[in-house]
Image (spheres, coloured by chain):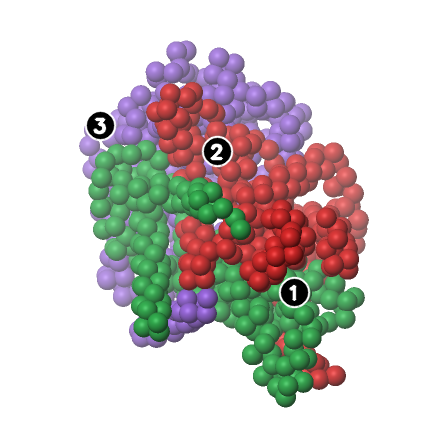
Chain colours: A purple, B green, C red
Amino acid sequence: MKKPCTGIAVLILFVPLVLLTLAGCSKETQIVLNVYNWGDYIDESILDDFEKQSGIKINYETFATNEDMYIKVKQGGTKYDVIVPSDYMIEKLIKEDLLAKIDVEKIQTYKYIDSRFLGLRFDPANQYAVPYIWGTFGILYNRTKVSDPVESWDILWNPKYAKQILMMDSVRDSLAVAFLRLGYSLNTTDTAQLTEAAELLIQQKPLVLAYVGDNYKDMMVQEEAALSMCWSGDAVFVREQNADLEYVIPKEGTNLWLDCMVIPKSSEHQEEALRFIDFMNQPEIAQRNIEYLGYATLNTAVFDLLDTQTREDPALYPPGEVSSRWEVFADIGDANVAYNRIWTEIKSR
Amino acid sequence: MVKRPVSLIYLCLIFVFLYAPIAVLIVFSFNATRSTYSWGGFSLEWYRALFQDRQIMRALYYTVLVASLSAVISAVAGTAAAVGIHRMKARIRRIFLALNNVPVLNPDIVTGISLMALFTALHLRLGFGSLLLSHITFSIPYVVLCILPKLRQLPAEVTEAAMDLGATPLYAFYRVVIPEIAPGIFTGLLIAFTLSIDDFVISFFTTGSGVNNLSIVVYSMARRGINPKINAVSTLLFAAVFILLLIINKRDAAAKQLEV
Amino acid sequence: MKRADVNFLQYPYILWAGLFIFIPLVIVLWYSFTVAGADGDAVFSLENYERFLSPVYMQVLSRSAVLAVKSTFICLLIGYPAALIITRLPRMWRNTILLLLVIPMWINFLLRTYAWMVLLGRRGVLNRILEFFGLPGQEWLYTETAVLIGMVYNFLPFMVLPLYSALSRIGKETIEAAEDLGANRFVVFRRVVLPQSVPGVIAGITMVFMPAVSAFVVSALLGGGQYMLIGNLIEQQFLYVGDWHFGSSLSIIMMVVILLTMALVSLYDKGASLEGGNLW
């Protein structure tokens, strides 16, 4: 027994030594920009290009949820220069005075940003956030399995599709569907409205096959379910995999979501951060990025470059009137307690 | 003794169970589409993309480095700790055993956030050091748990007998105690390595300054869906470990033959 | 006593445990006994513990505990024979087999769990195999069976390793001696092997049961997120509600409950070692 035991032990001892010597090489005194983004949310070759062009090194890190990111930024301990949070989280970060003001004059490419996505409630005066990606959510369904017309959120409550429905494993998103169906604001904190929405979700629970994360895409492609909540950007990817799938924004309305680039107050390289943001909005770069991501662009110059088929895809670029029926998530502050309490109740039935 | 064929079939079934998902994810590393669920034809696309990826290879490097360092350090420290705890008076021992169990028992998020709070309170810059420290912290208890049963099986007289024969306490410890508890140390080392390589939550909260491990990269992809590049890197890691294992076994077998 | 000479070994650990286990524990305790006051200060309060008394939360904890008990039990049931078989293998193989047992765990947890979804789906690999043999396909995914499969899968090596290390010392000689004395295989197992392996069983149960109580990702993915478990709830409080106070008290309550349970288990253990294994 001794032999293989020592062999393995020696090996485990050697690996770190070799790795450490390998790493001990390059150390330069270059400006390093810490970029903090969602995982797999950029065409990474763009980072290389930025480094080449500007001589600034990029330290690219990723997070899984807004909330994870928030704790890291709030606690300090490590400094970030550009982060990409979503709408409601930006509002929260601004409230807590964690973001630096951005001088849009210094961003030459700012003019390309579609004005529909500026001045929204989380940053009314456009002082903090530069929009990065946007989208909506709706219903993804399989044409061969759903015989009724899919126009309304009501269909997610249709007993005909019991155990064929996927909902999101997230309080805000699932409650949002209930609010939309009831005709309430997505950001309501009214107790009576909350209770009503909670009852609706509890009533729906027996019909739900599963509360899912990103894997709803695979489940729908594999036809494990017939109906699912879905984000617009994913819809394009999913349709390519299975031609029977269709994405619809129901008539009651939808959620407009935005991820924006912001600069934390603690950043030590704000000038360079602005340069990075400027770079990301250059039409040629933004186009490459959007092609990699498959989401909708908010850069007007890039939009003009798109082929007509993409431009007229209602999943990515819904017709203008939809914008009268969409609402952005806001930071609901203390109401989070009530929201999560409801979620716990739904999930303990 | 246990009947051979039955027990071998049993072991084989367990290995089928353990390796079935691994086989699935290896297959999907050769998938032509960006899905880890539905098959779209054979391609080496994700391996090509992997070598152009700036994040994954670095993360792999840190993952292996932190896992091996923390496993070795925890194994050494855990052995010392187990021996120490074993010799404590019963009442104190019970307290330390409970304390030892706290990281095993605590949800990762609590361990992660409280360690992060501790590091920031100490004005320690989050990065490689804090990551390694926290991995050692959650690994030691498991090593202790692996070694304590071995120490309890060890008759107290063994060390004393050795010392009666003129061995110094330290010599007796190395020559008598260590070989007896070696299987415990070995399993502890394996567990520590495994825990480290697979940890996400604690790593996420205690790292910083550009130091990432593979788990952080994988989990952060959860919103967009896991990129099959990860399947490719896992396949390579898996293949590397397998080849190493084969080499070691070959070498041992050869050494055995020479001895004979 | 001469034995005292190696006792210095315990001091580094005491220091380490004090800094990295005890202090964080005190931080968590402090949070659990305070609430955010009017001007953001922390005020002493038992409110967090009172809040837990609502039936919803109790149910969350009991559901998690039941799931953990079930998966620990299955791990023990499957793992014990496996560990026993490994100790009977030729010496050369043993470490290799042990390594082969943990190597799957070196592949990321999320990937492994996603792979299980491919295996267990309605049109998954398992159902296709069943259909191939003319058997009807089953609903696996999003059932308790799937959750248990996932839990056992992830925890099994942590059961087998300590069991193996405890069983590995019971030499062939002891067993053969017992057999020579006329004991049959079953008696040898009950009287010699089982009692000697009790510390390993305890270690294995500890290593599987304790983390299993707060594990929740497997249940969220393979069980379809139908139920909230204590791990979810704690994460929700820390991350989404931002109420570290209630989150801390939840984890303290969970710890106390589990430590008490484990103390009961170790009472058994003490009995076994005192009576020299006459417990069974």
In-image side of C257 versus A78 (left or right): right
Which corner quadrant holds the N terminus of chain C? bottom right
Q: Residues within 10 Å of mark 3 (few under 14, many from 20)?
A: few
| Res. A227 mark | none
* Residue type (three-letter) at the residue carrying disc 1: Gln
The chain to which mark 2 is attached is A
| Res. B153 mark | 1
Report the mark closest to the observer, 2 or 1: 1
The residue shown at (40%, 34%) is: C119
- Across and down, in percent, residue C78 comes to 54, 43
* Residue type (three-letter) at the residue carrying disc 3: Gln
- Across and down, in percent, residue A227 comes to 43, 22
- Across and down, in percent, residue C133 comes to 37, 24
* Residue type (three-letter) at the residue carrying disc 2: Val
Q: Residues within 10 Å of mark 2 (few under 14, many from 20)?
A: many
Q: Which residue is mark 3?
A: A309
Label 3 and label 2 in one chain: yes
Report the mark closest to the observer, 3 or 1: 1
Q: Which residue is mark 2?
A: A212
Report the mark closest to the observer, 3 or 2: 2
In-image side of B86 versus B232 (left or right): right
Answer whether residue B57 is visible to the viewer in this image.
no
Q: Kindly state the secondary structure of the residue where label 1 is placed.
A: helix
Give the CA distance from mark 3 to mark 1.
74 Å
C-beta proximity under 8 Å, tags 3 and 2: no
C-beta proximity under 8 Å, tags 3 and 1: no
